Image (cartoon, rainbow, N blue to C red):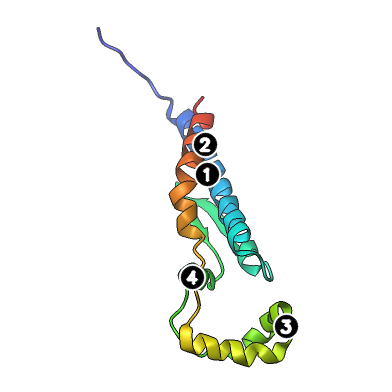
């Protein structure tokens, strides 16, 4: 007995694109949620910059440049003090403490606050499965 399965290419393409769009949106939200839940929010610039878009059957994730420094931390370096003044004012109540923060970063670097890797390790596979199941039901 021979079994033949025919797949309508246009229908498959439409369903697959629907799944990819759902995956992109849910991964984008999962990254934002984990970042906020695990590490709080200062200005919200990093959270609001996280984007996941579908381009040529590929999900492209982008975010503000400093996302990699949040994810991996930094080695010791002396950052521009003026760029720390707003943070020092918001978090420490005095922008003059930016010098002390810059000095500490020059000695120790910054600690990593991973949010990308943990999201992919725990949440992406269920997101992909659920969207594919939903699209091809």
Q: Which of marks 2 and 4 is nearer the N terminus?
A: 4
Q: Is 50 situated above or below 12?
A: below
- Spatial CA span between label 2 and label 1: 6 Å
Residue lying furthest left: 1
Looking at marks 3 and 2 on the same chain, the residue that comes earlier in the sequence is marked by: 3
Q: Are marks 3 and 2 in contact (CB under 8 Å)?
A: no
Q: Tell whether label 1 touches label 4 (CB within 8 Å).
A: no
Label 2 close to label 4 by CB (< 8 Å) = no
Q: Badges 2 and 1: C-beta atoms under 8 Å apart?
A: yes
Q: Which residue is denoted by mark 4 in the rendering? A: 112
User: In the depicted view, which residue is nearer to us: 86 or 50?
Assistant: 86
Residue that carries the numbered disc 3 in the rendered image = 89
Residue bearing the label numbered 1: 23
Q: Of 24 and 68, which appears nearest the observer?
A: 68
Distance (Cα) linking label 1 and label 3: 38 Å
Q: What element carries label 1?
A: helix
* Label 4 environment density (alpha carbons within 10 Å; few <14, some 14–19, many ≥20): few
Horizontally, is 134 left or right of 99 in the view? Answer: left
Q: Looking at the picture, does residue 11 appear above or below residue 86? A: above
Quarter of the image that includes the N terminus: top left
Q: Judge whether 44 appears above or below 100 on screen.
A: above
Instruction: Give whichever of discs 4 and 1 has the lower sequence position.
Output: 1
Q: Is mark 2 on a helix, strand or loop?
A: helix
* The image quarter in which residue 103 lies: bottom right
Residue at coordinates 50% horizontally, 53% vertically from top-left? 119
Q: Which of 90 and 63 is in front in this view?
A: 90
Q: Which mark is residue 131?
A: 2
Image coordinates of residue 55 in percent, x first then y, are 49, 52
**Residue depicted at 57% across the width and 46% down the height:** 26
């Amino acid at each position: 007995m021979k079994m033949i399965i025919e797949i309508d290419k246009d229908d498959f393409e439409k369903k697959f694109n629907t799944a990819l769009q759902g995956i992109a949106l849910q991964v984008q939200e999962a990254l934002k949620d984990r970042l906020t839940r695990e590490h709080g929010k200062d200005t919200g610039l990093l959270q609001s910059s996280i984007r996941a878009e579908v381009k040529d059957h590929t999900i492209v994730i982008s975010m503000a440049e400093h996302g990699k420094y949040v994810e991996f931390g930094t080695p010791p370096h002396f950052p521009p003090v003026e760029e720390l003044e707003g943070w020092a004012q918001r978090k420490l109540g005095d922008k003059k403490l930016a010098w002390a923060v810059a000095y500490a970063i020059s000695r120790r670097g910054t600690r990593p606050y991973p949010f990308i890797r943990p999201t992919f390790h725990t949440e992406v596979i269920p997101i992909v499965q659920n969207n594919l199941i939903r699209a091809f039901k």
